[in-house]
Structures are given as C-alpha cells and as structure tokens.
Image (spheres, rainbow, N blue to C red):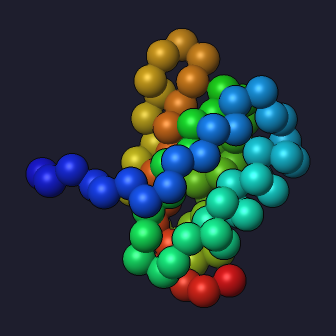
C-alpha cells in the first residue's frame, strides 16, 4: 500500500473536548478538497469523537492509530467544501 501524502499536520496535544473538535474542524477547513490532514492528539475521547465527527461532515477517515500509550494520530481526507 502506498504512503498517504500528508498535506497538513495539526498538533492538538494538551487540548480537551470541545477544543479538540473545534481545532480539528478548523484544520480541515484550512486545506483543499482532496488533501489530507494528520491530527496528533492525546485526549482519549477525541480519538473516538474526531473520526466520527469527520465522517458526519462528509470527509474520509484514512487512519486512526494509537502511536504510544497516550497519543493517537488521525488522518482525514477532505471530501467536501465546508
């Protein structure tokens, strides 16, 4: 499988809900349709809520991966203009 090209990285470690979702949504709004944002987070609930919200907004969730005991990366491809 080919590597996904990451167009923007967003580090929201230290943020908690609802700020994790707000920052993630703003990050997606800042990229073009078809581009991919990689979100780095450390708030456990956000590793579940952000992917669900992105799907609800009409975007594709390419990856949700726990990279260590306290951090996750979420990759989202923007599919629709906000």
Residue 31 spot, x, y in % from top left: 56, 71
65 to 82, vertically: above or below: above
Query: Whole-percent x and y of residue 76?
Result: 49, 59
Q: In x, y percent, where is residue 42?
A: 66, 27
For the question of whether residue 53 can be seen, the reply is no
Query: Residue drawn at (66%, 72%), measured in percent from left and top?
Result: 29
Vertical order, 70 against 62 (above or below): above
The residue positioned 70% from the left and 38% from the top of the image is 12
Farthest residue to the top: give it.
69
Closer to us: 74 or 44: 74
**What is the quadrant of the C terminus in the image?**
bottom right
31 relative to 50 in the view: left or right: left
Total marks drawn? 0
Outermost residue toward the bottom?
81
User: Can residue 10 be seen here?
Assistant: yes
The residue lying at 43 percent from left, 70 percent from top is 35
For residue 68, side relative to residue 57 (left or right): left
Name the residue nearer the viewer: 59 or 35: 35
């Amino acid at each position: 499988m080919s590597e996904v090209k990451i167009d923007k990285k967003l580090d929201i470690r230290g943020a908690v809900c609802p700020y994790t979702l707000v920052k993630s949504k703003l990050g997606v709004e800042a990229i073009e349709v078809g581009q991919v944002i990689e979100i780095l987070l450390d708030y456990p609930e956000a590793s579940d809520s952000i992917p669900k919200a992105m799907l609800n907004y009409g975007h594709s969730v390419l990856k949700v991966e726990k990279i260590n005991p306290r951090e996750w990366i979420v990759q989202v491809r923007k599919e629709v203009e906000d």
